[in-house]
């Protein structure tokens, strides 16, 4: 795998150019294609470190590209989307997206997210990680510097928003946080977030925690109020 090649799949030339420029300036090697089929071929041939994938492509939908990509690759994917109903499909379907940004977006912010995801996907740093094992949240280890969370000793494979959501709950053990508070803290860069986006992420987080410990259900639902992390639940 090339650790610098970023595949950009976008049919709007001006958008692709601005992303490629921002990536190039930060030392990445952007490779641009405009069609879904080209993207799948390029992902096979070039094994990029990350894929930036537009949902609305002329030939096949970016969501279908991601599904097919997942049959042969775990490469991180950031979706570009113009519509909030597409966001629901990205987070609601388990198609393995790592993140999404809504058009219009800042290419610099996108590149910052690329860095975060690559850091998370890359090998663990050799320096001793700053691990925070909070006695009020037994079982969890928050490694904020690496943007990682461990549960029962296992590294959780989290998307950006799942990570931020769980981090927020861990930082307020026992506190009930309303959907509005969670949207405010976790989705501050995505102002059109919907209540059901929060719910969808809580659902996927619970599934991942159960994947580590089948009897664990530390995230509690408070009907009409919100969610909390209950220590030892
Ligand atoms: Ca498009």
Image: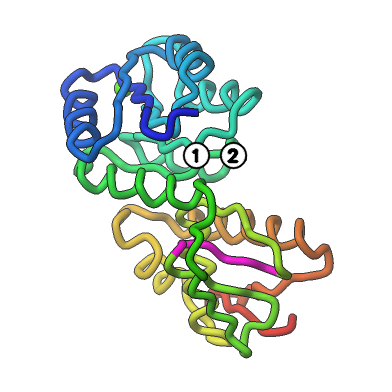
**Based on the displayed image, in which of its 4 quarters is residue 208 positioned?**
bottom right
Kindly state the secondary structure of the residue where label 1 is placed: helix
Residue at left 44%, top 27%? 48
For residue 90, the mark is 1
The relative height of residue 107 versus residue 32 in the rendered view (above or below) is below
The residue singled out by tag 2 in the image is 93
Residue at left 50%, top 39%? 90
For residue 98, the mark is none
Callout 1 touching callout 2 (CB < 8 Å): yes
The relative height of residue 21 versus residue 113 in the rendered view (above or below) is above
**Foreground residue among 124 and 215:** 124
* Residue 149 placement (x, y as % from top left): 57, 66
* Residue 64 placement (x, y as % from top left): 54, 22
Magenta stretch: give its range: 146-151
Q: Residue furthest right?
A: 215
Q: Quadrant of ligand 1?
A: top left
Q: Is 151 on the left or on the right of 128, as rendered?
A: right
Residue at left 29%, top 57%? 189
Q: Residues within 10 Å of mark 2 (few under 14, many from 20)?
A: few
Residue at left 52%, top 33%? 75
Distance between the alpha carbons at the discs numbered 1 and 2: 6 Å
The relative height of residue 197 versus residue 3 in the rendered view (above or below) is below
Query: Magenta stretch: residue 32 in it?
Result: no
**Foreground residue among 59 and 85:** 59
User: How many numbered circles does the render carry?
Assistant: 2
Q: Is 171 on the left or on the right of 94, as rendered?
A: left
* Residue 106 placement (x, y as % from top left): 19, 44
Q: Quadrant of the C terminus?
A: bottom right
Q: Residues within 10 Å of mark 1 (few under 14, many from 20)?
A: many
């Amino acid at each position: 795998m090339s650790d610098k090649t970023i595949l950009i799949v976008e049919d709007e030339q001006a958008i692709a150019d601005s992303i490629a420029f921002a990536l190039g300036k930060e030392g990445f090697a952007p490779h641009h294609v405009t069609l879904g089929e080209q993207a799948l071929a390029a992902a096979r041939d070039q094994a990029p470190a990350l894929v930036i994938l537009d949902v609305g492509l002329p030939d096949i939908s970016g969501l279908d590209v991601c599904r097919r990509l997942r049959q042969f690759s775990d490469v991180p994917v950031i979706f570009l989307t113009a519509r909030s109903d597409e966001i629901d499909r990205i987070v609601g379907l388990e198609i393995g997206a790592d993140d999404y940004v809504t058009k219009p977006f800042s290419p610099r912010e996108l590149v910052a997210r690329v860095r975060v995801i690559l850091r998370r996907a890359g090998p663990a740093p050799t320096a001793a990680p700053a691990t925070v094992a909070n006695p009020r949240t037994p079982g969890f280890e928050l490694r904020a510097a690496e943007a990682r969370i461990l549960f029962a000793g296992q590294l959780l494979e989290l998307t950006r928003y799942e990570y931020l959501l769980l981090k927020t709950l861990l930082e307020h053990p026992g506190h009930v946080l309303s959907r509005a508070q969670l949207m405010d803290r976790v989705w501050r860069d995505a102002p059109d977030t919907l209540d059901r986006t929060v719910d969808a992420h809580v659902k996927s987080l619970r599934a991942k925690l159960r994947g580590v410990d089948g009897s664990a259900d530390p995230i509690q639902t408070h009907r009409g109020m919100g969610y909390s992390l209950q220590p030892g639940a």
